Amino acid sequence: IYEAHVGMSSSEPRISSYREFADDVLPRIRANNYNTVQLMAVMEHSYYASFGYHVTNFFAVSSRSGTPEDLKYLIDKAHCLGLRVLMDVVHSHASNNVTDGLNGFEVGQSSQESYFHTGDRGYHKLWDSRLFNYSNWEVLRFLLSNLRWWLEEFKFDGFRFDGVTSMLYHHHGINMAFTGDYHEYFSEATDVDAVVYLMLANYLIHKILPDATVIAEDVSGMPGLGRPVSEGGIGFDYRLAMA
C-alpha cells in the first residue's frame, strides 16, 4: 500500500493537483509494484497543516487539489493501471470551526439534537476537535451515508479509518499503555456506541462492495477488531498499528 498526500506530491514548492498526481505519480507507484494507493486529505478541510484530519465538509472533495471530476479522473486512471484506491476517512472527530464546519450547527442544543456530545465529552483536548455522538441515529445516518457516497460516487475501493483507538474508548487511548489484559478493552471505558457504529460501517461497506478493503488505525489491539461482524467482531479487514 502506497500512502500518499496529493497536495505534497510535487517536487515543486506548491500544492499539487489530482490530475498531476494521476499523470505523474501513479505510473511510478505502479512501476514500483504497489497494488494499492491510500489517499490522505481527500475530504475538505480548512487547516492545511492538519493533513486533512480536521474535516470541515464530509461530503466535499478537498478543493486545493482540484474538482470532484479531477479526483474521479485520478481514481479512474488508478483503476486502469490495476491499482486499488483507499480513502483515509475521518469519522473519529471533526473540525471545531464554527464558520465552515459542523460545529457551526452547535447552538446549545442537547446532545441528542446535535452531531456532537455536549460538555467535555464532546471535545478532544489533544486534537482540538469535536467528537461525534454515535448514539444519535441521525449522526449514524450522516456518517453511514457519507461512506456510501464516497464508494458509489467516486468508486473508492475501501477506506482506512483514522483514529479508531480514540473512538473505541472514552479515554481515547490517551496516556494508556495497552498490555493485552481483557479489562483494558472490555470495561466501562469502552465506548459501546462507537463500537456499534464501526460494526454498522463495516457491514454497510462490505454489503455495497463485497471486495472492499477496510483498515483500522488502532494502537490498542482491540480483540475482534479484524473479525467479521457475523462472528461478533467489529468487521475490519486489517489493523494499522501506529506507534
Image (cartoon, helix red, strand yellow):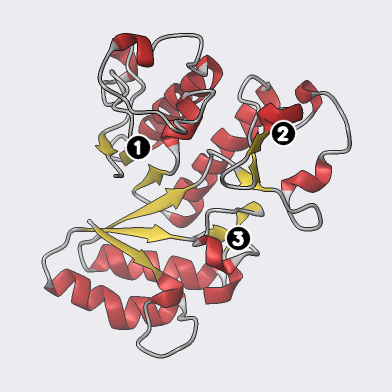
- The amino acid type found where label 3 is placed reads Glu
Give the residue at x 39% y 82%.
Answer: 20
> Where is residue 182, by image quadrant?
top left
Q: Secondary structure at mark 2?
A: loop
Q: Nearer the viewer, residue 228 or 135?
A: 135
x then y, percent, for residue 110 = 83, 23
| Residue at (50, 15) in percent of width and height | 189
Measured as percent of width and height from the top left, residue 28 is found at 20, 77
Asked which secondary structure carries label 1, the reply is strand
Q: Label 2 belongs to which residue? A: 115
Which residue carries the number 3 mark?
A: 44
Q: Which mark identifies residue 125?
A: none
Question: Amino acid type of disc 1?
Answer: Ala
For the residues bearing labels 1 and 3, Cβ distance under 8 angstroms? no
Left/right of residue 79 with respect to residue 117 in the rendered view: left
Counting other residues with Cα less than 10 Å from the Cα at mark 3, is it few (<14), some (14-19), or many (20 or more)?
many
Residue that carries the numbered disc 1 in the rendered image: 216
Mark 2 residue type:
Tyr
* Residue 192 visible in the snapshot: yes
